[in-house]
Image (cartoon, rainbow, N blue to C red):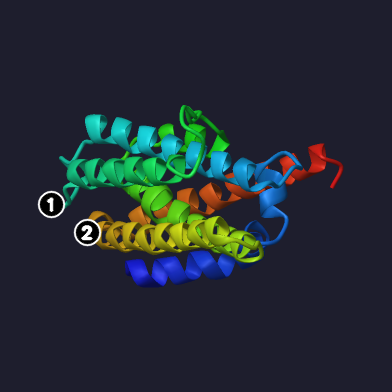
Amino acid sequence: MDAETFCRELEADRQSQLDRLGSERLPVALTDGEPTGTGVLRAAANSEHAAHVTFREWATTADDRAGEGVDTQSLFAWTADREADHREQVCDTLDAGYDPVDGGTLHTYLRERATPVERVAAGLVARPVVSERTHSRLVSFFDDRDGEAAAGRAALFRTLRRETAEERRRGLDALDGLCATADDWERARMVAGYTVQVVYDDFLDTLAGLGD
């Protein structure tokens, strides 16, 4: 097994869920049934903020003693900074004073991961795989709206999607160094798949609560 194969298999195994997470129902779920531009941007800011907090915490608690030379502390710190930058870019599109909210079922699950393999597989492979789909949907959401502001917001989410893909590439490089045995790859497979499941279940629960 190698990380590229691992990622392809994850996407194939979870294709149906990933497709729905990138569907037209996503903005509805993100905004509790009121998919306005402001609501979508606030949800995105909250998501980027929660990711920043998760990776900041991981950077302070990283244990690289069994990491086959992979410096996860630096990787998590870099990702925390990247997510903080994403948060600020999204907040810049909102009215001054918006304070993003931390939390969510995804980050509750991620923050319970303790080992380098689990953290990288869940946070830097599976999470970006999901985020690339959701960013694509938000690009389409703003592309479908008229005006210079909407065009700028679509461009913003294209940038976030591209930079999130870079996070995934770094995660895959790290996973290749961390997974020394078949058991390591199996553990990575389990947590990555469950990460997608957590996001998907939350998506379905939100839509069900809206009567969808």
Q: Nearer the viewer, residue 63 or 152?
A: 152
Distance between the alpha carbons at the discs numbered 1 and 2: 7 Å
Which residue shows up at 46% across the image and 27% down it?
97
Q: Relative to 140, say whether 196 is above or below.
A: above
Residue wearing tag 1: 69
Badge 2 element = helix
Residue 165 visible in rendering? yes
Marked residue nearer the N-terminal end (1 or 2): 1
Q: Which amino acid, by three-letter code, is at mark 1?
A: Gly
Which residue shows up at 32% across the image and 62% down it?
166
State the image coordinates of residue 54 (x, y, percent, origin top left).
Answer: 38, 35
Q: Which amino acid, by three-letter code, is at mark 2?
A: Gly
State the image coordinates of residue 174 (x, y, percent, origin top left).
Answer: 25, 57
Q: Residue furthest front?
A: 148
Which residue shows up at 77% across the image and 44% down it?
207
Describe residue 63's horizontal placement relative to residue 47 as left or right: left
Q: How many marks?
A: 2
Describe residue 191's horizontal placement relative to residue 38 as left or right: left
Q: Nearer the viewer, residue 95 or 5?
A: 95
**Which quadrant is the N terminus positioned in?**
bottom left
Badge 1 element = loop
Q: Which mark is residue 30?
A: none
Which residue shows up at 54% across the image and 55% down it?
149
Q: Nearer the viewer, residue 187 or 143?
A: 143
State the image coordinates of residue 19 (x, y, percent, origin top left).
Answer: 64, 65
Q: Relative to 179, say whether 58 is above or below.
A: above
Is disc 1 surrounded by few (<14), some (14 to 19) or many (20+) residues within 10 Å? few
Residue 1 visible in rendering? no
Residue wearing tag 2: 177
Is disc 2 surrounded by few (<14), some (14 to 19) or many (20+) residues within 10 Å? some
Instruction: Please say if the residues under marks 1 and 2 sit with CB atoms less than 8 Å apart.
Output: yes
